[in-house]
Image: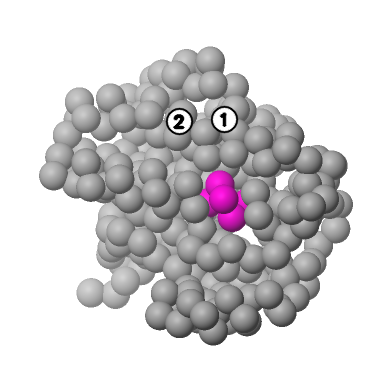
Amino acid sequence: MNITVIMESFFQNKTIWITGASSGIGEALAIRLAQTGCHIIISARRADELERVKLRCKNQQNIYVLPLDVTDFDHVDDAKNKAISLTGKIDILINNAGVSQRSLVRETLFSVDKRMMEINYFGTVAITKAVLPHFLENGKGHYVTVSSVTGKYGTPFRSAYSASKHALHGFFDSLRAELEPSGIKVTLITPGFIKTPITFAALTGDGSPLNSSDVGNANGLDPDYFAEKMLQAVASEKREKAIGGPKEIFGIYMKRFFPGMFANMIKKINVR
């Protein structure tokens, strides 16, 4: 059977909650999923941007806007309750909220490291734990977390970002080992460079936004293409899937099998 047909069938009639849905990967996922006949809850901090994304989607009657700041930890559980009340269930949680970084370690304030972990790691863990009782009660559910190839190897200018993504891999690998016997799935997606606005909001050493793009992202994969490949991996219930350009994906295997060669290579690479 054609993979697209399998994917359409997999998502049909499911309720999918996407965080970080106001731009980039999250926006592309919402637009593609809206074509499958599922219900989609889109969350991010900016309600106006979420409404813009909804207007770009088909079947808008199945799109629900739920503003959420994943670092507002005291209200994450309330948001989960609101999400469930919209359709009566959550089948898939796509953890996509996050922020990037562009600064050398020696130039990066500790407050930036802390902020990166609060958004990328603790925010994701908070919403994951909030949804867990619902999944356990239903005896099913699917966590999908968007990490990064820097969750597999660190690069210059990404120390805090890479650390937060490495943390996600450790957490969700452990969560998968605990929950798979219960019928709950965990998929980790590790993107390479994707052509999204993420670098504009990337934090610099003092915490201010970069407000510009870089060569890697400018030449990255089209977000619509990436969303298609990612959703195919989710529908196939992959435990982990790397999606990116050949150089970024090659780096994962280099780091694993030839760590010395990788260390010499990565220190010379232009990732800014």
Q: Quadrant of residue 46?
A: top right
* Element assignment for label 2: helix
Residue 4 left/right relative to 54: left
User: Residue 196 location, x and y as percent?
Assistant: 69, 59
Q: Is residue 215 left or right of residue 255?
A: right
Name the residue rendered at 70%, 65% in the picture.
Answer: 156
Q: Position of residue 80 (x, y in %)?
A: 43, 23
| Range of residues picked out in magenta | 161-165
User: What amino acid type is highlighted by mark number 2?
Assistant: Ile
| CB under 8 Å between discs 1 and 2 | yes
Q: Quadrant of residue 13?
A: top left
Name the main secondary structure of what is drawn in magenta.
helix
Is residue 162 covered in magenta? yes
Q: Is residue 65 above or below residue 225?
A: above
Check the image and report above or below for 74 versus 61.
Answer: above
**65 horizontally vs 24: left or right:** left
Q: Residue at x 40, y 55 (%)?
A: 188
Residue 127, disc: 2
What residue is shown with label 1? Answer: 70
Left or right: where does residue 242 sit relative to residue 134?
Answer: right
| Residue 34 seen in the figure | no
- Residue 30, percent across and down? 52, 49
Q: Nearer the viewer, residue 200 or 109?
A: 109
Residue depicted at 68% across the width and 75% down the height = 267
- Residue 54 is inside the magenta segment: no
